[in-house]
Structures are given as structure tokens and as C-alpha cells.
Image (tube, rainbow, N blue to C red):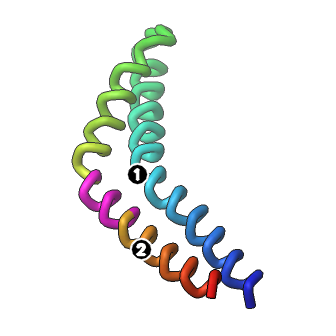
């Protein structure tokens, strides 16, 4: 039973990391793809042009979704502490 609790805790931690990081990464990917398409159409091949909009998009998504991310993190942390109580006893 102890191994199952440990694996459950590890699985929840990995899943939380993916869920919290996904919105920021997806916004950066979408903005980068849109700018790449615009660069291809206009034949402007400046490599540094994509970085600033990606950073702004990631920051905007981070600001908008921060309350949700904090709520997910605190909820999962509370669950982890409950698992630790069961694991220790």
C-alpha cells in the first residue's frame, strides 16, 4: 500500500506540472506559429521577431490564469499533505 500512495503522489505532481505549464506553453506556440506564417507570407526572415510577442503572450496568459494556477497548486498541495499523513502512519 505504501508504494501505491507514493506512486499516486508522484503521478499527481507530474500531472500538476503539466496542467499548470500547458496554458503558457500553448500560448507561446500559437503566437510563434502565427508570426512564422506572417513571416513566410511577407518574406521577412528576422529570427528575433518572434521572441517579444511570445514573451508578451506568455506573460498575459500567466497574469490571466494565475488565480486558477494558484488554486490548483494549493489544492494539490493540501491533497499531498493528506497523503503524507496516511503514508507516515
Who's the residue at 47% across and 50% down the image? 21
Instruction: Identify the residue under disc 1.
Output: 23
Q: Give the range drawn in magenta.
A: 66-73
Q: Does the magenta stretch include residue 64?
A: no
Q: What element carries label 1?
A: helix
Q: Is disc 2 placed on a helix, strand or loop?
A: helix
- Viewer-closest of 6 and 25: 6
In which quarter of the view is residue 55 placed?
A: top left
Q: Residue 78, image x and y in percent?
A: 41, 74
69 within the magenta span: yes
Question: In the image, is residue 48 above or below residue 71?
Answer: above
Q: Mark 1 to mark 2: distance in Å?
A: 23 Å
Q: Residue at x 53, y 57 (%)?
A: 18
Query: What residue did someone put label 2 on?
Result: 78
Q: In this view, does 9 lie above or below 42?
A: below
In the image, residue 83 sits, relative to residue 58, either above or below, namely below
Q: Which of marks 1 and 2 is nearer the N terminus?
A: 1
For the image, the number of numbered tags is 2
Amino acid at each position: 500500500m505504501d508504494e501505491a500512495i507514493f506512486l499516486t503522489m508522484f503521478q499527481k505532481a507530474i500531472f500538476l506540472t503539466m496542467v499548470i505549464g500547458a496554458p503558457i506553453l500553448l500560448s507561446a506556440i500559437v503566437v510563434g506559429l502565427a508570426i512564422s506564417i506572417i513571416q513566410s507570407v511577407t518574406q521577412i526572415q528576422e529570427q528575433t521577431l518572434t521572441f517579444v510577442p511570445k514573451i508578451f503572450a506568455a506573460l498575459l496568459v500567466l497574469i490571466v490564469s494565475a488565480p486558477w494556477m494558484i488554486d490548483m497548486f494549493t489544492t494539490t498541495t493540501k491533497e499531498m499533505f493528506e497523503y503524507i499523513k496516511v503514508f507516515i502512519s
